[in-house]
């Protein structure tokens, strides 16, 4: 009977708003993580990311991907850890490549770290994301689901619409204040914004 209960638990269907809210919660948590990391390693407040405001979309995208791909493995933390390392490393590498090509800026550089690939990803980052993915999928998602289900449907929709408008306003700001946003790759010489 317990197996059946676990299977039912894993088959909870989620609507669009579940994933929108999860995206923004994780993007905000990622921003907090990055700001705290900067504060404790560089002793300065650094607003990380391409947007002005408290969220980093790469964390939201990564978290939603892990949720979609690994939720069924929730009871196997080691597998979730290893797959989270792989998924997040691929996402981080591709994001770094895109941002560098599109903006002419390297937003992070792991060149000095052990087992790095082109300075875009490294072993320490992969392990950190593996641990974060395992914590998210195995422990935090069940808690998030309970909180989400406690919110009345109208509040879910309202919050998601506000989050989406917040994101769009940041997108419009970048579009209006950047010559290179959503255009050809940036022709400027490469600059490094942040060295880990």
Image (cartoon, helix red, strand yellow):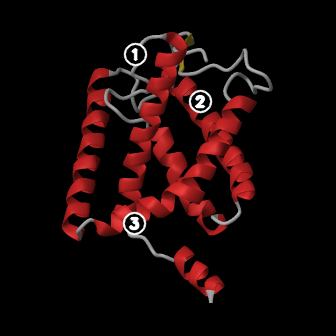
x, y percent for residue 179: 35, 20
* Residue of label 1: 45
Q: What element carries label 3?
A: helix
Within 10 angstroms of label 3, few (less than 14), some, or many (20 or more) residues? few
- Which residue is drawn at the image coordinates 75% and 27% (left, top)? 117
**Which tag, 3 or 2, sits closer to the chain's start?**
2
Within 10 angstroms of label 1, few (less than 14), some, or many (20 or more) residues? few
* Residue of label 2: 96
Q: In which quarter of the image is residue 166?
A: top left
Q: Is mark 1 on a helix, strand or loop?
A: loop
Q: Nearer the viewer, mark 3 or mark 2?
A: 3
* Residue of label 3: 146
Q: Quadrant of the N terminus?
A: bottom right
x, y percent for residue 125: 66, 32
Q: Quadrant of residue 194?
A: top right
- Which residue is drawn at the image coordinates 42% and 32% (left, top)? 32
Within 10 angstroms of label 2, few (less than 14), some, or many (20 or more) residues? many
């Amino acid at each position: 009977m317990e197996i059946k209960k676990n299977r039912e638990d894993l088959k909870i269907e989620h609507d669009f708003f579940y994933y929108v809210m999860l995206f923004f919660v994780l993007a905000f948590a990622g921003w907090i993580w990055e700001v705290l990391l900067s504060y404790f390693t560089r002793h300065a407040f650094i607003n990380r990311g391409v947007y002005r405001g408290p969220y980093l979309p790469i964390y939201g995208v990564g978290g939603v991907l892990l949720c979609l791909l690994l939720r069924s493995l929730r009871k196997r933390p080691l597998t979730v850890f290893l797959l989270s390392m792989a998924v997040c490393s691929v996402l981080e590498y591709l994001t770094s490549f895109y941002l560098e090509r599109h903006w002419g800026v390297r937003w992070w550089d792991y060149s000095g770290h052990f087992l790095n690939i082109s300075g875009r990803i490294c072993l320490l980052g992969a392990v950190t994301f593996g641990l974060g993915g395992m914590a998210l999928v195995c422990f935090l998602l069940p808690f998030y689901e309970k909180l989400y289900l406690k919110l009345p449907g109208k509040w879910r929709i309202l919050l998601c619409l506000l989050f989406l408008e917040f994101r769009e306003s940041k997108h419009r700001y970048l579009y209006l204040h950047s010559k290179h946003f959503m255009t050809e790759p940036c022709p400027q010489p490469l600059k490094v914004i942040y060295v880990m």
